[in-house]
Structure formats: structure tokens, C-alpha cells
Amino acid sequence: MKSILIAMLVAMTLPFGLATPACAGSGDVVVENAWSRASIGTSRPGAAYMDIRNAGDEDVTLTGLRTDLAGMPEFHLTSTNNQGVSSMSPVGEIAIAPGETVALAPGGMHAMLMQLRRPMEEGGTFPLTLLFSDGGEVTVEVPIRGIAARGPDD
């Protein structure tokens, strides 16, 4: 009787499992042009910028990030209203289509590094790990540029 119940449960759930979209691997992700700016101490948040490219054949979903530099790293989006007032808000998951690149850049989406544990000093680096829905991780070493830097080459 027990084996019949198990077989029925498997038969009932099998179609749902087949309908679930497959997740592309985080191994298909390429991170380029990572950089950040030096901070003024630790009382203000820092930010990191980069290009995240999906080199695979299926969507990948970025779900979060981790770094020992900050107690609360999140993806944020800067937006400006019609009165010219800018604000930032957290971004949930970020889906990246095959062949597409998501740019984390000043004035747009970026990695917000809140609750800095140490100052971000020009010339230094820090590891930043991107977390994906497939359980995979991609870690990039982020160089810290000058406080007035405007890109990865400043």
C-alpha cells in the first residue's frame, strides 16, 4: 500500500517538475570591468560597479551578493523623478537573458555596500561574491579607485 501511495505522489508531481524551467549555470557568467571608489571612512556606504554577462544559452538569475567588506550588501537602483530628485531603492532578483549584459554603473543599478566594516582605501581590493538562483557563486576581486573615479580606468 505504501509503495502505491508513493507511486501516485510521484505520478502527480512529475508533470509539475517537467514544467519547471531549467536554470542556466552560474558558470556561464562573465564579470568584467569591476571597480569601486574609495570611501570616506566607514560611516557612509560604498558601491561597486561592473558588467555581468550571461555567456550561456539560458537565463541566469542573480539573487544577491556577499562580501566581508560590508555587513549589508544589496543591489540598488538609482532613479530620478521629474523634479530632478534622485533616490535609491533595493533591487530584488536580476534576470540576465542569454547573450545579454547587465551593467552596474554610477547613476543606475549598482552594488550598494552598507555597514562598511573597514574603509575602502584607494589602491586596495576586496572580494565580492555574486549569488545565483542555481546555488552557484562567482567571486570577483574589485579594485578600489580614487574617491573621484568615474570608471574602471580612473
Image: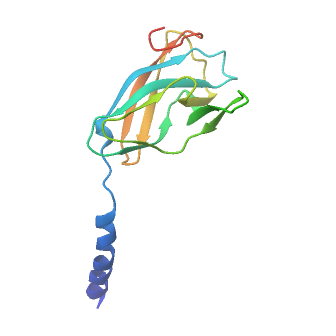
Q: Position of residue 153 (x, y in %)?
A: 44, 10
Judge by depth and name the residue closer to the eye, 2 or 15: 15
Q: Position of residue 28 (x, y in %)?
A: 29, 37
What residue is shown at x 40% (from left), y 48% (from top)?
133
Q: Position of residue 131 (x, y in %)?
A: 43, 40
Residue furthest bottom in the image: 1
Give the image quarter of residue 62.
top left
**Image quarter in which the N terminus is found:** bottom left
What residue is shown at x 49% (from left), y 35% (from top)?
66
Q: Position of residue 27 (x, y in %)?
A: 29, 38
Give the answer, above or below, for where 39 lies relative to 52. above
Q: Is residue 3 left or right of residue 83?
A: left
Give the answer, above or below, for where 47 lies relative to 129. above
Q: Is residue 91 left or right of residue 14?
A: right
Give the image quarter of residue 45.
top right
Residue furthest front in the image: 82
Give the image quarter of residue 11.
bottom left
Colour setting: rainbow
Give the answer, above or below, for where 102 lies relative to 7. above
What residue is shown at x 31% (from left), y 40% (from top)?
98
